[in-house]
Image (cartoon, rainbow, N blue to C red):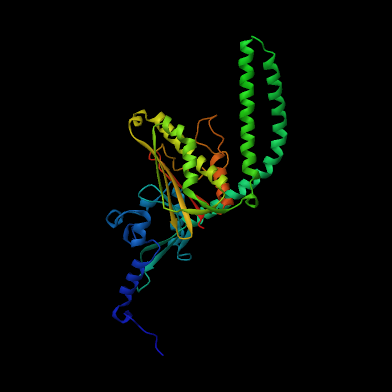
């Protein structure tokens, strides 16, 4: 029995090919022998943000990022033009029109006429953004596990002598009488030992937490958000920050209330710091309204909560590192670089995820997800 033909009989081979390429969900670009783009499909336009008018006639350099050295493309084209190889396939990072990096698995092959002569080259890209994100999450959890092993031993070895130093400093402070210089120096010693103790406490919090200790239950989001906002209200008033809350009515998640509070506190405090740093860099912005928004909605079987600010933003080369332990963009002495690592760890324990989107000077948006009830 012959298979149904549908509309295929109305199309010749060239028309069928053109429609398939145009409808392909992966970016496709076609170049002539001079390596100028003569065709891009709809998926290519969506992936990179260039219109066809902007792309056609340009070289593939329109997508070149800082990760692609000149000899990289030279090596690639040697393989493509080598008759014994005839193609190239590998990972490359393209640069979209808006400056965002797009990792792709790229395949480049020649296309030929009926006589076998090369007419040009075709490139097909497979977007690896989601795969890279998941890979980074796995690597992050591995790093946190390693830190946990190191921390458990370090906390005792460092914490005990620090406690002794602080105790001796307090004893000397009680005997200092009217020696103001000595009192001042002893106060400095006590404050610095407290700072070290706080750092060790953060490390222990990062390493000791375990998903086995988490008690997940149906939790209404609005009361938790309101409680955290009340706690941080003085910081908002001090910096004249407008706080907007827009949560979908009745939003609930499977979460631990104490841990969820910690996540929100970290993200909101970071937002305040970002706005403060914006004031430092651009004093004129103090006359402009600064805001923090807390948004929440249901997305399939999960809830999404977004904390968005109008702060200084994050440089693109820092975005991939911000969840790494000890990485901080704050000035020396103003941050340990553990806050977002702890946030990532807590959300992982609650079967959640977290993402970040930011542009330097244009604010930051953290979005985390949790399972719905």
Pick the front one: 148 or 67: 148
Residue 154 visible? The answer is yes
Q: Residue at x 33, y 70 (%)?
A: 19
Which residue is outermost to the left? 53
Between 220 and 326, which is closer to the camera in this rendering? 220
Of all residues, the one furthest to the bottom in this rendering is 1
| Residue 66, percent from left and from top | 43, 46
- Looking at the image, residue 50 lies above or below residue 117: above
Residue 157, image x, y percentages: 72, 34
Quarter where residue 17 is shown: bottom left
Seen at 46% across and 39% down, the residue is 229
- 210 and 174: which one is in front? 174
Task: Return the residue nearer the eye: 168 or 358.
Answer: 168
Side of 346 relative to 274 (left or right): right
Give residue 83's position: percent from left, percent from top. 45, 65
Task: Locate residue 182: give its quadrant.
Answer: top right
Q: Position of 303 compared to 209: left or right?
A: left
In the figure, 284 relative to 321: above or below?
above
């Amino acid at each position: 029995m012959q298979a149904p033909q549908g509309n295929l009989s109305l199309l010749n081979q060239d028309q069928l090919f053109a429609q398939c390429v145009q409808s392909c969900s992966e970016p496709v670009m076609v170049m002539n022998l001079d390596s100028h783009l003569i065709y891009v499909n709809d998926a290519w336009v969506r992936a990179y943000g260039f219109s066809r008018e902007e792309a056609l006639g340009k070289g593939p350099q329109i997508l070149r990022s800082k990760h692609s050295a000149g000899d990289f493309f030279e090596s690639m084209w040697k393989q493509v033009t080598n008759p014994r190889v005839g193609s190239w396939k590998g990972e490359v990072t393209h640069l979209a029109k808006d400056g965002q990096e797009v990792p792709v698995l790229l395949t480049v092959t020649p296309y030929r006429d009926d006589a076998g002569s090369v007419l040009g080259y075709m490139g097909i890209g497979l977007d690896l953004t989601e795969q890279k994100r998941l890979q980074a999450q796995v690597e992050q959890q591995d790093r946190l596990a390693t830190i946990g092993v190191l921390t458990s031993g370090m906390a005792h070895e460092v914490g005990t002598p620090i406690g002794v130093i602080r105790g001796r400093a307090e004893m000397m402070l009680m005997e200092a009488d009217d020696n103001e210089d000595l009192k001042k120096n002893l106060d400095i010693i006590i404050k610095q030992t407290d700072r070290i103790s706080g750092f060790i406490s953060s490390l222990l919090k990062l390493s000791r937490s375990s998903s086995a200790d988490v008690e997940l239950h149906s939790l209404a989001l609005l009361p938790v958000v309101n409680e955290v906002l009340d706690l941080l209200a003085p910081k908002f008033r001090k910096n004249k920050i407008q706080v907007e809350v827009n949560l979908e009515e009745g939003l609930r998640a499977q979460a631990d209330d104490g841990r969820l509070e910690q996540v929100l506190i970290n993200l909101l405090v970071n937002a305040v710091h970002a706005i403060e740093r914006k004031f430092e860099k651009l004093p004129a912005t103090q006359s402009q309204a600064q805001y923090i928004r807390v948004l929440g909605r249901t997305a399939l079987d999960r809830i999404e909560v977004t904390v968005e600010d109008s702060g200084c933003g994050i440089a693109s080369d820092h975005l991939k590192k911000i969840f790494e332990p000890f990485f901080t963009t704050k000035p020396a002495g103003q941050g340990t670089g553990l806050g977002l690592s702890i946030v990532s760890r807590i959300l992982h324990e609650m079967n959640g995820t977290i993402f970040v989107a930011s542009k330097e000077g244009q604010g930051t948006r953290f979005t985390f997800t949790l399972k719905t009830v």
